[in-house]
Image (tube, coloured by chain):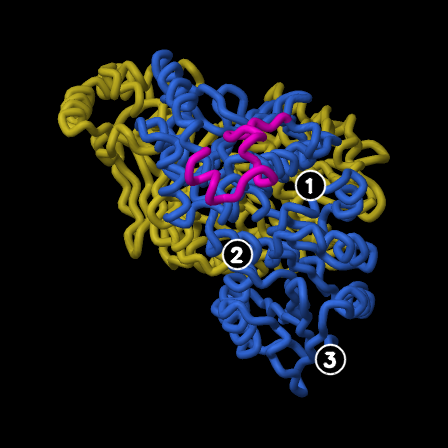
Chain colours: A yellow, B blue
Amino acid sequence: MKNIPLILMGCGGVGRQLLQHMVSCRSLHAKLGIHLRVVGVCDSKSLVVASDVFSMELGDEILLEVCRVKLDGSSLLTLSGSGEFQVFANSEIPKRIIDIAALLGKSTGLAFVDCSASSETIGVLNRVVDLGCCIVLANKKPLTSTMEDYDKLVSYPRRIRHESTVGAGLPVIASLNRIISCGDPVHRIIGSLSGTLGYVMSEVEDGKPLSQVVKSAKSLGYTEPDPRDDLGGMDVARKALILARLLGRRINLDSIKIESLYPEEMGSSVMSTEEFLGNAISLLDKNIQERVHKASLNGNVLRYVCVIEGSRCEVGIQELPKNSPLGRLRGSDNVLGIYSRCYNEQPLVIQGAGAGNDTTASGVLADILDIQDLFP
Amino acid sequence: MKNIPLILMGCGGVGRQLLQHMVSCRSLHAKLGIHLRVVGVCDSKSLVVASDVFSMELGDEILLEVCRVKLDGSSLLTLSGSGEFQVFANSEIPKRIIDIAALLGKSTGLAFVDCSASSETIGVLNRVVDLGCCIVLANKKPLTSTMEDYDKLVSYPRRIRHESTVGAGLPVIASLNRIISCGDPVHRIIGSLSGTLGYVMSEVEDGKPLSQVVKSAKSLGYTEPDPRDDLGGMDVARKALILARLLGRRINLDSIKIESLYPEEMGSSVMSTEEFLGNAISLLDKNIQERVHKASLNGNVLRYVCVIEGSRCEVGIQELPKNSPLGRLRGSDNVLGIYSRCYNEQPLVIQGAGAGNDTTASGVLADILDIQDLFP
């Protein structure tokens, strides 16, 4: 039985779902000859770690207890340490983690699984790379920081996986890596990579006012607590940057042209979420409605897309034929079209649910299984 | 630099294209820290092998010469052995190959890459599995033989890749393996997995007679030399069987319900290709035309699909909504829809070119790169 020791960073929806998937896949993974040995779990404020990281692990009961505690909104500090595990607070976390990485990285191997949405993990991740550890990311921040951070993280390309940073569990990164490794040059990528904006654009296409659509999307749980975090396009831009860098473009987030669906005067430094949703957003209805109408006169629809082509990397609204893969998209599915030498006239298209804790965590879990050959 | 020794079996269109891709990817693969060291190449009648399989290889000039010789329709025996390599004839091949596998399999590692379309490789492949070798297949036959052969081949699941057996280079197998490894249960697969039959069905939808469409497809090079090899559905059935077995179904080719587009009375044991295309096939036009018409009255179209669902595994014509992913398919693209817990209401859809030597060989090459961590 091959043993993959790992440390989970981030116990939000995705992290908790991942723990639950790991527990429920025990017998499946045993059949595949794999045991995922969780030696540590941390959030931004505390770290739970097995008492002996060489031979012990956080058992399934503890992992499920971690899920319960975090779902309740409590701190991991409320778990009282036992013989099996210890709990450390904030200031001690980085040092403890680096110590474990140094112990395990080059002997039994160790995977860091970042399911947080924080930039604060970057420092630790950069350091554990050199200690021989593997990295699996659902967190987009580490890959969208400076080129220096990026180069560091991918310095051992086989030791990093990050499927769930783009399109959740959709096999986008795995497919692109295959295309790259066989020398098939990618000319163009076009995608709709935000379930929220996909939903919004297909609803306004049906004539509903933007303000109303955004409010419904928020009440359906499709948006971030402040919908401007979706409407601003930054999340899509991060995904575009990850794809562009995978293709070898050495660019930063600020070199991506981003179209925001709201103007600066309605930004979060100017007004609260309530003010934005209360009065401001309806001022945007007319303009979008006119653009939708204008597009429809040409048989087109509006979609919020990312386009990577040559030196161009941009995210924003585009007018697309109603009868194209992106134009046909309805609801919150993601879709990506890849054009290369092999997929020249017709793109390689990957489409499906691109959000949700279940599919995101499933993508992370498949990534962990995918690095198994690096473990002794 | 990691060294991956390999033996290529089959120098038809796909095998030759693979050799050319390997040669032209040398600098890309060097950047990835990989050198693909071809120690042997064989077709059904001869084997070219490096004089010292531990330290030597068939250099790029020899590989390109192999391509030229085979493209000319000549035998590899016309290559005169030099200090660098030796050429062996028919009867010696299996013994020589097993010897090399025994030498390299457990020391430097060795990958067998089967780009033939023959059942004759099965015996050798079964034996090299136990000698520690990896297997990469474009050839569907080894995976669609008996369950006993299948179990043997996949007995070390990490050591086998076969992306190009289904949908050419489309990331179908890689994606399914990801879904399986994270415990997401697949409920249903539906796909159009024959570029030829995809083309035929979308042309008859436009009102053209089947006989005319098949003749055009043949003259465009879309079909096998005898188009009945496509129209009979056996090729699609093999792909369906590979997918079904990947999902854990323990079934054989003869348990798949296959709808042939021509009746037994027009089989190849009864009449020649010329007779079939000359007179017989036009007798089939009316029936297909009526089915197309009947489907269109319901807003549907006919597609030749494979369906795997529960214990059901069948290939044949189905009436599908014009506005479904399969119904919209035009031309020779392949498309696969996967329904699982994560892709429940809307399937995960993978679509693109599913045939052609370039994309098939690219899929094989990506598979070879994907097993690199198994080499020392």
Give the x, y percent position of residue A244: 39, 51
Callout 3: chain:
B
Front one among B354 and A259: B354
Disc on res. B144: 1
Same chain, labels 2 and 3 = yes
Mark 1 or 2: in front is 1
Q: Chain of mark 2?
A: B
Dot 2 corresponds to which residue?
B361
Is residue B273 part of the magenta span, yes or no?
Answer: yes
Do circles 1 and 3 both sit on a common chain? Answer: yes
Q: In this view of the protein, which residue sits in the foreground, B255 or A285?
A: B255
Q: Residues within 10 Å of mark 2 (few under 14, many from 20)?
A: many
Q: Quadrant of the C terminus of chain B?
A: bottom right
N-terminal-most mark, 1 or 2: 1
Separation of marks 1 and 2 at Cα, in angstroms = 20 Å
Image quadrant where one finds the N terminus of chain B = bottom right
**Quick one: SS at disc 1?**
helix
Q: Secondary structure at mark 3?
A: loop
| Quadrant assignment, res A208 | top left
Location of residue A29 (image quadrant): top right
For residue A211, side relative to residue A124 (left or right): left
Verify CB contact (< 8 Å) between mark 2 and mark 3: no
| Residue type at tag 1 | Thr
Is B226 above or below relative to B203? Answer: below
Q: Amino acid at mark 2?
A: Ala
Closer to the camera: disc 1 or disc 3?
Answer: 1
Question: Which residue is disc 3 drawn over?
Answer: B52
For disc 1, the chain is B
